[in-house]
Amino acid sequence: MNEKLNVCLMNDSFPPTIDGVANVVVNYAKHITASHGSCAVATPEYPGVQDNYPFPVIRYPSIDTTQLVGYRAGNPLVPETVETLRRMDFNLIHSHCPVVSTVLARSLRDASGVPVIFTYHTKFDIDIAKAVRSQLLQQAAIDVLVRNISACDEVWVVSEGAGENLRSLGYEGDYLVMPNGVDLEKGQAPGSAVKALNDQWNLPAEAPVFLFLGRMMWYKGQKLILNGLKKLMEAGKDFCMVFVGDGQDRAEIEAYADELGLSDRCRFTGAVQDREQVRAWYCRADLLLFPSTFDTNGLVVREAAACGLGSMLVKGSCAAEGVTDGRTGILIEETGEALGAALLALDIQKMHEIGRHAMEEIYLSWADSVAMANERYHIVLENHKSGKLQPKTGPLRGFYTIGDEMRSELAAARDTAGAVRSAADSMRGAVKETVRSSFKEAAEELQRELNKAQSILERYL
């Protein structure tokens, strides 16, 4: 396994878009280039971006869908893109997104004959539900997504919980758990960097400082955090809560903090892209509050551990995998009351003790993570060369067929929706006719009664 590989990494998001999976791809690319061979990243184009990396970044045509999904959507059906990548003579393809990137990966596989590995990072059913309101279209999108994943030669998940979520969507194939690492080395930030945060954000010297770091979306658990802190405030405890990150729900989250009377105890910094400043936040805080059940891996938990910061997590969540309650983290039920009660039971000394254990026991570097992935790359290639990998040549093969599938799924959903609308129109018509007939009969009966009355009056008048 000393052969140096040339790997094509693909993902729908990449800097300047910052999210967890974009960070994963950057670190895969850096460590592959530094220690294991060569690679290139294929990702949608972004206006005005300049890619200054020690590896090539191949940008392909995209449209602006940032308001819908938070990043630009690429067009994987451009033959020139596939031809450009084919000429780069990759050994294998590794996609990190099951939509556009995997469509492109399959197209490149058809053109080059090299295997495709796919990593499942995110609970896409939640993202789809947020972007598409129609349940019919949601299911159609999930069906296409699962078929796309099933067409890959090997599937990885970042945690057992991620695998369970993938199964719940209808995926029936095999998968391998391949955990992600973190790009922060063990150690503390310079004291000057921590002091700068204290000064800039007016952080208390004695009271505990709690930290949330991630996208500002309700499904990350911010409402649970704020509800728990409300209990802490009502108990007369002093504290400061720092939210580092940005997202579509930020304004609502800030408004909710104000509604609960927590505004003066909260700091909302916005997104922080400077990794050393991120380290400084981890080193300044006393405990990371990350009660997310959405995340499939929870990289921030390992990042915090690199800096000696422990985390409070929801029992059974993916972020809590590998964390021992009371030693390398605090595990709670998914309620604000549980979070508040757990914070009331902790002192700063215990928080710091948990942080030290987390650094020693749950930290995983990107160097180690990518080294494990590289070993598996070689196994996949050996299986491919020996014929152990079954060719994915079914009806899903090729990007033109994938496009047809997408259109077919959406057309079926539209047909179903049309049938429902037609049935509803028929019902409305029947109701109108029934009402119209009822009024007509009632009017005729009333007229008959009036005629009788008139006859009687004429007889006696």
Image (cartoon, rainbow, N blue to C red):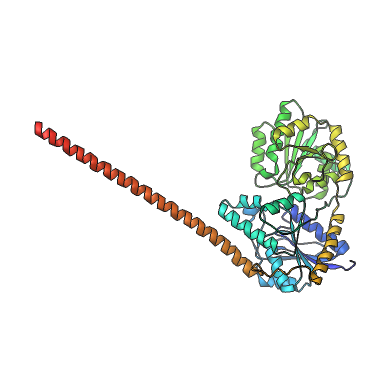
Can residue 119 be seen in the rendering of this structure?
Answer: yes
Can residue 461 be seen in the rendering of this structure?
Answer: no
Query: Left of 290 or right of it: where is 194?
Result: right
Location of the N terminus by quadrant is bottom right
The location of residue 54, given as percent across then percent down, is 83, 63
Q: Based on the displayed image, in which of its 4 quarters is residue 286 positioned? A: top right
The location of residue 230, given as percent across then percent down, is 70, 31
Residue appearing at x 75%, y 56% in the figure: 22
Location of the C terminus by quadrant is top left
The location of residue 46, given as percent across then percent down, is 69, 61
Q: Based on the displayed image, in which of its 4 quarters is residue 449 positioned? A: top left
Query: Left of 43 or right of it: where is 453?
Result: left
Given the current orientation, which residue lies at the most extreme top position?
A: 236
Query: Left of 342 or right of it: where is 137?
Result: left
Eyeballing the image, is 156 above or below 447? below
Residue appearing at x 68%, y 72% in the figure: 80
Eyeballing the image, is 168 above or below 73? above
Total residue callouts: 0
Q: Based on the displayed image, in which of its 4 quarters is residue 400 positioned? A: bottom right
Residue appearing at x 75%, y 30% in the figure: 341
The location of residue 290, given as percent across then percent down, is 75, 41
Query: Left of 444 or right of it: where is 398?
Result: right
Considering depth in this image, is 349 or 294 the residue closer to the camera? 294
Considering depth in this image, is 229 or 239 the residue closer to the camera? 229
